[in-house]
Image (cartoon, rainbow, N blue to C red):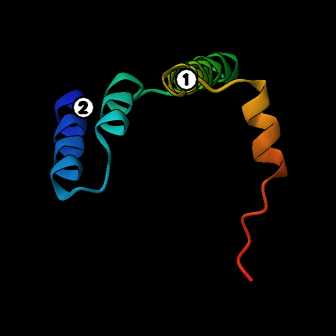
Amino acid sequence: MYTSTVYNRFTTMETAGKLTNVQIELLKLFQYNLPEKQLAEIKNMLAKYFAETATAGMDKLWQENNWNNDTMKQWANEHLRKK
């Protein structure tokens, strides 16, 4: 009974556009309180996942554009302000 009520509430929020698909899935998975240690571990796993995804995306950009350390030095010395 509780699970279906919670699920219906999540579904209603989802259709109202207030929560993202990731938020909905996380709420479904973790509808109960966890010990602080487990919560910290989950936060670390999520942070690691998003950091790895961002790194892979940047690596792809660097490879596609043939960027290297000289590119970084050039960017550091550019003056992009308009007068």
- Which of the 4 quarters of the picture holds residue 10? top left
Image side of residue 44 versus residue 5, left or right: right
The N terminus lies in quadrant: top left
Question: How far separated are the C-alphas under marks 2 and 1?
Answer: 27 Å
Which residue is identified by label 2? 2
The residue at which mark 1 appears reads as 46
Q: Quadrant of the C terminus?
A: bottom right
Identify which residue is drawn at 58% across, 23% down: 66
Q: Residue 63 location, x and y as percent?
A: 54, 19
Q: Position of residue 8 (x, y in %)?
A: 16, 41
- The crowd level at tag 1 (other Cα within 10 Å; few <14, some 14-19, many 20+) is few
Is disc 2 placed on a helix, strand or loop? Answer: helix
Q: Position of residue 18 (x, y in %)?
A: 30, 56
Q: Secondary structure at mark 1?
A: helix
Q: Residues within 10 Å of mark 2 (few under 14, many from 20)?
A: few
| Residue 55, above or below 82 | above
Picture coordinates of residue 49, whole percent (x, y): 54, 19
Mark nearest the camera among 2 and 1 is 1
- Kind of residue at badge 1: Leu
Task: Name the residue located 72 percent from the left edge and 64 percent from the top edge.
Answer: 80
Q: Does 19 sit left or right of 61 as displayed?
A: left
Asked if 78 appears above or below 76 in the picture, the reply is below
Is label 2 in contact with label 1 (beta carbons under 8 Å)? no
Mark 2 or mark 1: name the one nearer the start of the chain.
Answer: 2
Q: Residue at x 42, y 25 (%)?
A: 30
